Image (spheres, rainbow, N blue to C red):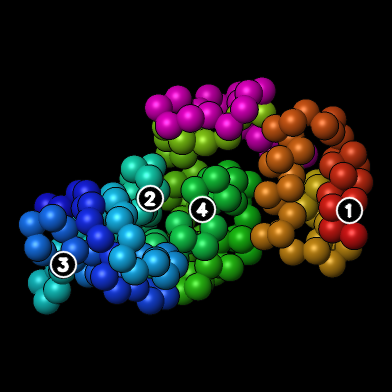
Amino acid sequence: MIGYISGTIVYSDSQKSIVLTAQGVGYEIHTATPMVPNRDTALYISHIIREQSQDLYGFESADDKKFFEMLLDVNGIGPKSAFSLVSHLGIQQIISAITFENVDILKSAPGVGKKSAEQMILSLKDKITKLEVGLSTKEKPVKSGAKVQNDNLLDAHMVKETLAACQNLGFKDVDVLPMIQKHLLSGAAARPEDLVKLILKELR
């Protein structure tokens, strides 16, 4: 199995890149965004082998690769959907959406429908507190290798109340949730109404 590739980018578009290694082998890899040709790169690889094909999915971090592979264990989530989730939302936003059962954010990723989003929440909600990636309300964002504790996860009540208030004002969850995370981590708000005020200042 291929787990890591380094080399020079010889071609790239919005979906795939070809990386030429020092051994003279060019690997075609699924990448989230176009990469600049003739530059060196190094990617963590998830090697998906099927009966009729083999595909390489490239990630900038080992955490992204690990999370992508965990998503593949969810019924109804294939490599394309999992890659779309990690590429468009990022690990932290997926974790928050699952923790607070926010289907709308999950299905905002291309190729992810309501049923798949609901299945992700059902399958992964109990698992994400054991991941070695995540966010803490008492510390700065935890680094890879630091486990997330249940009592340190973002306050569910605060998040749900703030999201509901922002929805009533016409704002989308996918735009608001990163701001909620930022202000909770900074300790700038103690009540949902305080969070809403801070968010409105940024959005207006």
Is residue 106 rendered magenta in the image? no
Label 4 to label 1: alpha-carbon separation: 24 Å
Pointer 4 or 1: first along the chain:
4
Label 1 to label 2: alpha-carbon separation: 33 Å
Residue underneath mark 2: 60
Residue underneath mark 4: 90
Residue underneath mark 1: 200
Pointer 3 or 2: first along the chain:
3
The three-letter amino acid code for the residue at tag 1 is Leu
Q: Nearer the viewer, residue 112 or 136?
A: 136
The residue carrying pointer 3 sits among few (fewer than 14), some (14 to 19) or many (20 or more) residues within 10 Å by Cα, namely: some
109 relative position to 190: left or right: left
Q: Residue at x 74, y 35 (%)?
A: 184
- Asked whether residue 69 appears in the rendered view, the answer is no
Is residue 151 rendered magenta in the image? yes
Q: Which residues are magenta?
A: 138-158
